[in-house]
């Protein structure tokens, strides 16, 4: 998997589900599907490419498979697919997995841009918040990475059930103890918040 936290979290989640369920992972048009499809197969996940199917073909494909749940990875994907999937699979529970709250990330970014550009960034954050919340309201459940994100949605009045699935990342053994108790981390915060 990629090393960014959202991808690691999703990979570990899939790894936990595969022994119990037959898991399909449908990509929504990512032109760069390899090495991801191969990595999914190694996990025991069956990869599909949604752009290869019309809604009717997709429905026919899954009519023999009673899907207990459909997990939509991130609000932007869910915003597009929930109406289609609700119509095709009315009995399936639709779960939106949010590795992070997009509106919160954009709101934080707006605080960091120069003052002259801030209003445009704030307006974008408000637009994303409205879309994201509307998407979560259409879902049967939302999964989030932290309890504080779930609490934020609850305080904001979202009545869709929210569940926390933390970052599931194995931690390798630490190196042997150092002769001092001092450590230095070197890094940057050049990625957008």
Image: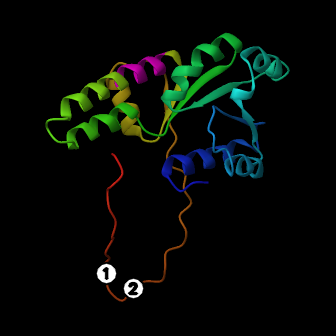
Q: Is residue 103 above or below residue 61?
A: below
Res 181 label: 1
Res 149 label: none
Residue holding disc 2: 178
For the point 38% across and 35% down, the residue is 149
Question: Is residue 92 visible in this depiction of the protein?
Answer: yes
Q: Secondary structure at mark 2?
A: loop
Location of residue 90 (image quadrant): top right
Could you tell whether 47 is left or right of 135 in the image?
right
For the point 34% across and 30% down, the residue is 152
From the image, which quarter does the C terminus lie in? Answer: top left
Location of residue 186 (image quadrant): bottom left
Q: Secondary structure at mark 1?
A: loop
- Disc 1 from disc 2: Cα separation: 7 Å
Could you tell whether 117 is left or right of 103 in the image?
left
Q: Is residue 58 above or below residue 112?
A: above
Residue that protrudes farthest toward the left in the picture? 115
Q: Which residues are the magenta region? A: 129-137
- Magenta: main secondary structure equals helix
For the point 41% across and 32% down, the residue is 150
Foreground: 154 or 94?
94
Crowd tier of the residue under label 2, counting other residues whose Cα lies within 10 Å: few below 14, some 14–19, many 20 or above: few
Q: Do labels 1 and 2 touch, CB within 8 Å? A: yes
Residue 122, position as x, y percentages in the image: 24, 29
Residue 52, position as x, y percentages in the image: 74, 28
Foreground: 115 or 145?
115
């Amino acid at each position: 998997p990629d090393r960014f936290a959202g991808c690691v979290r999703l990979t570990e989640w899939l790894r936990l589900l595969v022994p119990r369920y037959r898991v399909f992972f449908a990509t929504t048009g990512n032109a760069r599907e390899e090495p991801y499809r191969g990595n999914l197969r190694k996990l025991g996940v069956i990869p599909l490419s949604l752009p290869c199917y019309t809604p009717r073909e997709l429905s026919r494909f899954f009519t023999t498979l009673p899907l207990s749940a459909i997990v939509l990875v991130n609000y932007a994907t869910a915003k597009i697919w929930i109406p289609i999937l609700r119509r095709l699979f009315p009995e399936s529970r639709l779960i939106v997995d949010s590795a992070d709250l997009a509106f919160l990330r954009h709101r934080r970014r707006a605080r960091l841009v120069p003052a002259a550009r801030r209003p445009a960034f704030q307006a974008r954050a408000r637009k994303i918040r409205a879309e994201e919340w509307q998407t979560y309201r259409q879902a049967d459940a939302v999964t989030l990475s932290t309890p504080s994100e779930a609490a934020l949605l609850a305080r904001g009045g979202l009545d869709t059930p929210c569940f926390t699935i933390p970052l599931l990342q194995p931690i390798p053994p630490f190196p042997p103890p150092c002769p001092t108790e001092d450590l230095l981390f070197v890094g940057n915060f050049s990625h957008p918040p």
